[in-house]
Image (cartoon, rainbow, N blue to C red):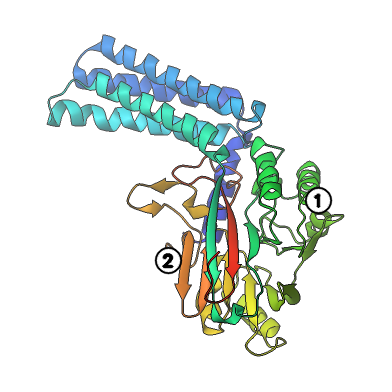
Amino acid sequence: MDYNRLHRTLISLQKLASWRWWQVSIVLLLLALSGGLAVGGVVADARWGAAAGVGLLLFMLLDGALLGALPRLHLSFGPLQPPLLALAVLRWSICLILTPLLVLLLNLWPLAVITALQFMLTALIIYGCMVEPSRLTLTRLEVSQARLAGMSRPVRILHLTDLHMERPTPRDRKVLELAADLSPDLILLTGDYLNLSYADDDTAVAHARDWLTRLDAPLGVFGVLGTPEVDLRQRAGDVFAGTRVRWLRNEAVRVEVAGQAIFLVGVTCDRDPQADSAALDAVLRGLPEDSYTILMYHTPDLMPEAAQRGIGLYVAGHTHGGQWRLPFYGAVLTSSVYGKRYEMGHYVQGATELYVSRGLGMEGLAAPRARFICPPEVVLLTLLPSGSTE
């Protein structure tokens, strides 16, 4: 699924956020009633059907309580109605699909199995919404290339992306504490600073700006913008105002790194591969031949072009690593034009090394504020002089 299609889907589902609670309650009651009737019909026992309907409604109410607790715990701040209704339909589907399967095909009594599955779903909700989004991870990667031979020492680069800020969270504080502890030489930011639900929200902008003011590194802090729908171009100046972040807009900047010059190439993500590739070419034409370049671009979608042009290091985000991953399969969605080809992690193509970070925040609008097998990620890249080890 491409990002524009995902964006349109989230906008459509966001309409559920305007539903009145009496409307949501009617839907939940109808789902519980029909689920109970279906179970009672299959097992030929109205009492068990009534028990199933009541149990289904209780699980739905528990979902509402858990989702409603997220903003009070300062974990996330999305609308309640869309994920609650989605979970209600999922729980209802478990009853309708599994009951006849267990009874008619496998000759098993269904209620114990279905109840166990409903409890498992509750455990996944608690973990995905309350635990994993705050389970900050640190990834370390060493990069050693021939064009780094002139460096006198290793150089540490902190890469942060996809902050998707809504309101202050404990995760935001943990990132700042980790950044201070790591003491990087250079900090690179690759876009999506605000959440899609709060892209034009003054409070979210102020929070992001305050957070960014706390980032500092001896060789500088540099940033590019992410997708146009998230990093609204008219608000970018407000986000960066008063911070130490140097905003790169289709330009390159020369940085002296341990006795060697490298060029940070910042390309604005307009979600138009042809236009963005042309912008990359325009920046590269002004650089010295054989210079070592680090490309900062929000998505991994310029990787083939970067490899063709001999980019040394390319840092990106956007995919969130899928945000929801399945065992043995990985990312469910990436919103990349290349699908799962560059879904997350380290890739090498020719002389170019790409690292796609899972990012820090979560998708907005009606999307559930949850991560599964895909915790938020801070990336520390260490540039090593050619032929050396740290």
Left or right of 383, for residue 216 = right
- Give the residue displayed 54% in from the left and 43% down from the top: 367
Local crowd at mark 1 within 10 Å, few (<14), some, or many (≥20)? some
Which residue type does callout 1 highlight? Thr
In the rendered image, which quarter is residue 302 located in?
Answer: bottom right
- Give the residue displayed 79% in from the left and 41% down from the top: 203
Local crowd at mark 2 within 10 Å, few (<14), some, or many (≥20)? few
**Separation of disc 1 and disc 2 at Cα?**
35 Å
Front residue of 11 and 252? 252
Left or right of 325, for residue 355 = right
Of the image marks 1 and 2, the number of the one nearer the N terminus: 1
For mark 2, what is the residue? 341
Residue 328 placement (x, y as % from top left): 32, 51
Q: How many labels, in total?
A: 2
For mark 1, what is the residue? 213
| Label drawn at residue 224 | none
Position of 167 relative to 236 (above/below): above
Which residue type does callout 2 highlight? Arg
